């Protein structure tokens, strides 16, 4: 069974695998990493994906209570500090940057967020929520809330929730072959459930007639993405670009789908799964981030080469966050 250390480091390892291949076509990736893609953690530099995951983790570590009122100023501060950091030089997403600019100006978060965006920036940073051993409604609300501060589209919220739940299921010891079915059941059960205590009146900023319609749209799109993974796994394909089967990953539900697909192709082989995620024509680092977090949730830190933990960028910070996360799986 996996552990929190495996989840956070696994995300960073995936990020480092995919960061050098993002924005490249498959032939370019193979030329740069012959014969069939990265064979090891050749680059230890991570992208804004890991930086943002650490920002969410720091907010959770600092929180006295896990509720929206407590976490909103902490997440706001962490996101703004990340946006202004000299280390924010990894091609950050413009959705996050625009929202962070408004958050820094003191705009209420329901107005500051990018209401039409469901970019993968919403769920590439949610892994630490999945390690929290808390009631399901807290995990769900927090996963959606951390996304909502920058990505206000209902599918960004739902896909982030599903991503955190996937991590949680695997940490609980769920077999990978059961994961997809459990996630589709979870998505169906969440249709129409709007977390008012976390999301306030966010839905009123949309064109939906009621909160239940707003969040149901997100879950329906997320469920459709999960069903594409199910269809792709009926005849597992170990050579075709995963983005051609489950989506390029620039948006939240596709990042979840393609990250899951790469994990489920090689759930017991971290290097093979991360290579599969990195040799993609879409948002390779975000896809590989999610694949890595699922691997860590399933395999634990023992599932990765020991030398990777010392080599990866921000290793000292990751170690501190793993030890500081409250109510974590060990």
Image (tube, rainbow, N blue to C red):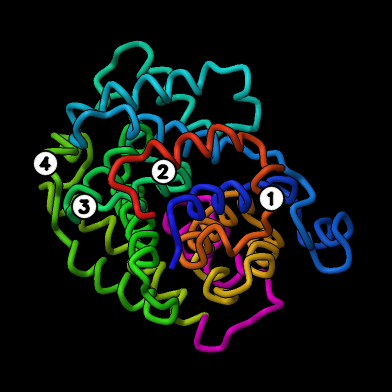
Assign a secondary structure to mark 4: helix
Per the image, the residue denoted by label 2 is 122
Tell me how far mark 4 sits from mark 2, CA to CA.
19 Å
Quadrant of the rendering where the N terminus is positioned: bottom left
Per the image, the residue denoted by label 1 is 308
Q: Quadrant of residue 303?
A: bottom right
The residue shown at (83%, 56%) is 28
**Mark 2 nearby-residue class (10 Å; few <14, some 14–19, many ≥20):** many
**Marks 3 and 1, the one that precedes in the sequence:** 3
Residue mark closest to the camera, 4 vs 1: 1
Q: Quadrant of residue 73?
A: top left
Seen from the viewer's position, the closer of residues 4 and 10 is: 4
**Marks 4 and 2, the one that precedes in the sequence:** 2
Tell me how far mark 2 sits from mark 3, CA to CA.
15 Å
**Marks 4 and 1, the one that precedes in the sequence:** 4
The residue shown at (80%, 57%) is 29
Q: Where does the image place residue 50, in percent across and percent down from the top left?
A: 55, 40
Residue mark closest to the camera, 4 vs 3: 4
Q: Are marks 4 and 1 in contact (CB under 8 Å)?
A: no
Tell me how far mark 4 sits from mark 3, CA to CA.
11 Å
Q: Are marks 3 and 1 in contact (CB under 8 Å)?
A: no
**Mark 1 nearby-residue class (10 Å; few <14, some 14–19, many ≥20):** some
Tell me how far mark 2 sits from mark 1, CA to CA.
26 Å
Taking 290 as reference, is 176 above or below it?
below
Tell me how far mark 3 sits from mark 1, CA to CA.
39 Å
Q: Is residue 39 left or right of residue 231?
A: right
245 part of magenta stretch: yes
Q: Where does the image place residue 65, in percent across and percent down from the top left?
A: 19, 33
Q: Where does the image place residue 251, in percent across and percent down from the top left?
A: 47, 51
Per the image, the residue denoted by label 4 is 196
Which region of the structure is painted magenta?
A: 233-258
């Amino acid at each position: 069974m996996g552990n929190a250390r495996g989840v956070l480091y696994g995300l960073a390892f995936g990020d480092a695998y995919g960061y050098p291949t993002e924005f490249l076509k498959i032939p370019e990736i193979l030329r740069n990493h012959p014969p069939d893609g990265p064979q090891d953690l050749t680059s230890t530099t991570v992208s804004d994906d890991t930086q943002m995951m650490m920002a969410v983790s720091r907010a959770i570590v600092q929180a006295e209570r896990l509720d929206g009122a407590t976490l909103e100023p902490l997440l706001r501060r962490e996101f703004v500090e990340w946006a202004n950091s000299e280390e924010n030089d990894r091609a950050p997403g413009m959705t996050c940057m625009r929202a962070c600019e408004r958050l820094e100006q003191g705009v209420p978060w329901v107005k500051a967020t990018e209401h039409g965006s469901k970019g993968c920036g919403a769920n590439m940073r949610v892994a630490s929520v999945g390690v929290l051993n808390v009631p399901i409604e807290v995990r769900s609300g927090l996963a959606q809330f951390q996304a909502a501060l920058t990505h206000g589209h209902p599918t960004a919220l739902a896909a982030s929730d599903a991503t955190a739940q996937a991590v949680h299921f695997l940490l609980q010891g769920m077999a990978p072959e059961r994961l997809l079915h459990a996630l589709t059941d979870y998505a169906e059960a969440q249709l129409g459930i709007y977390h008012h205590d976390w999301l306030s009146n966010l839905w009123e900023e949309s064109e939906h007639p009621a909160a239940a319609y707003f969040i149901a749209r997100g879950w329906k799109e997320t469920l459709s993405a999960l069903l594409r993974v199910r269809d792709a796994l009926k005849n597992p394909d170990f050579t075709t670009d995963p983005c051609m089967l489950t989506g390029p990953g620039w948006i939240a539900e596709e990042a979840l789908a393609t990250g899951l697909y790469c994990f489920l192709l090689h759930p017991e082989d971290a290097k093979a799964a991360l290579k599969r995620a990195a040799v993609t024509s879409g948002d390779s680092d975000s896809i590989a981030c999610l694949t890595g977090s699922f691997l860590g949730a399933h395999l634990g830190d023992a599932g990765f080469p020991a030398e990777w933990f010392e080599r990866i960028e921000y290793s000292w910070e990751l170690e501190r966050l793993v030890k500081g996360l409250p109510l974590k799986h060990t």
